Image (cartoon, helix red, strand yellow):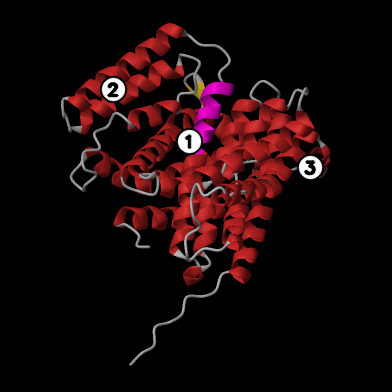
Amino acid sequence: MKLTKTFKAFFESEKSGGLLLLFVTIVSLLLANSSIQTEYIAFWAAKLGTHSLTEWINDGLMTIFFLLIGLELEREMYQGELSSIKNAALPIFGAFGGMIIPAGIFLVLNFGTITQNGAGIPMATDIAFAIGILSLLGNRVPTSLKVFLTALAVIDDLGAIMVIAIFYTESIAYLNLFIALAIMGGLFILNRRKVHNLIPYLIGGVAMWYFMLNSGIHATITGVLLAFVIPFGNGGKKTSSYKLQHFLHNPVAFFILPLFAIANTGIAIGSEWYEGLNHPNTIGIILGLVIGKPLGIWLFSFIAVSLGICTLPRDLKWSGILGAGMLGGIGFTMSIFITLLAFKNDGQEVITYSKIAILIASFIAGTIGFIWLKFNLRPARKKATK
């Protein structure tokens, strides 16, 4: 299986971005528990107008991240692994299992409690971190495993976006929502009239974001909606979609996601931080990500292949699927993002303990996944020299 240049560029940026995420997270945790703890945490809580600096990052800059996710998903649907039912079936089933089983484990422990809204937290996979860990294995990783994990994580993010839109919307201001959708309709007309200049789409996107922000539906949804009205054409280098996707790769990987990580992992860890880990909420998050993710991804993939819906690539074994499932348990960015939405009315303590659980679970999942794949994937054979 050959990798397209677009996929290679995406994989490389996500690989480097994942390693950077790890670095800034460690730095943020150290600063939040240093002698400048108060000043550091207060900095991110400082108000800029009606919102804090962290809220501007989460509601504003993360919309650009979702725009990139939307563009990547669109490309996968038109030209990549999701362009045919046969190729798409395996990661789709895997992603579906990787959302259903973790959410189910969480709900078994939390249904009927004030924390049941957190069911979406262990459903998420952090693309950058997962690919970053996978890249550390070098030439051991078969091409099909890279494609499977990437496609699975993109579908996973789409699932997370749907969860945000459906379950974490409390009330809707229908006039603002109607205006946002009307703007999207106008941009779609521009698309159909073959207007390829990005400027009107970006200006319209900002207007869409403003009205979506004030509609009650989370503003980051705008990013995905905007992606699907930007002209895709034949997907070539001269198309609007390709240009924007290519332009956004580095800013998202090396600025927006690290900034999100820094702003949201400034966690002051007290001497009794472990007391919050015996709550059904934190137990559900850890079990959902560490056990539910690999179990769901492997099981649903196995069922799909057993039913003849799809086939397992020749260079990929079931141990590789299980390893990818373990790396899928690295929730981090998306899990923290959903935590902020799920528990925004439940107090900072619940959010803090949930973040700690996410960090612990992501560390365990990444470590186990790396070790498992290292011992189960054989290094690529070097070509014999003449």
- Amino acid found under the numbered disc labelled 2: Gly
Ranked by sequence position, the earlier of labels 3 and 2 is 2
Ranked by sequence position, the earlier of labels 2 and 1 is 1
Residue at the far bottom in the pictured view:
386
- Amino acid found under the numbered disc labelled 1: Leu
Mark number displayed over residue 273: 3
Task: Using the image, determine if residue 112 lies above or below residue 100.
Answer: above
Q: Residue at x 20, y 26 (%)?
A: 192
- Residues 81 and 365: in front is 81
Q: Residue at x 64, y 64 (%)?
A: 372
Give the alpha-carbon distance from disc 3 to disc 2, as whole Å: 45 Å
Mark number displayed over residue 204: 2
Q: Residue at x 60, y 59 (%)?
A: 323
At mark 2, the secondary structure is helix
At mark 3, the secondary structure is helix
Residue 316, image x, y percentages: 51, 63
* Image quadrant where one finds the N terminus: bottom left
Mark number displayed over residue 158: 1
Give the alpha-carbon distance from disc 2 to disc 1, as whole Å: 22 Å
Is residue 112 among what the camera can see? yes
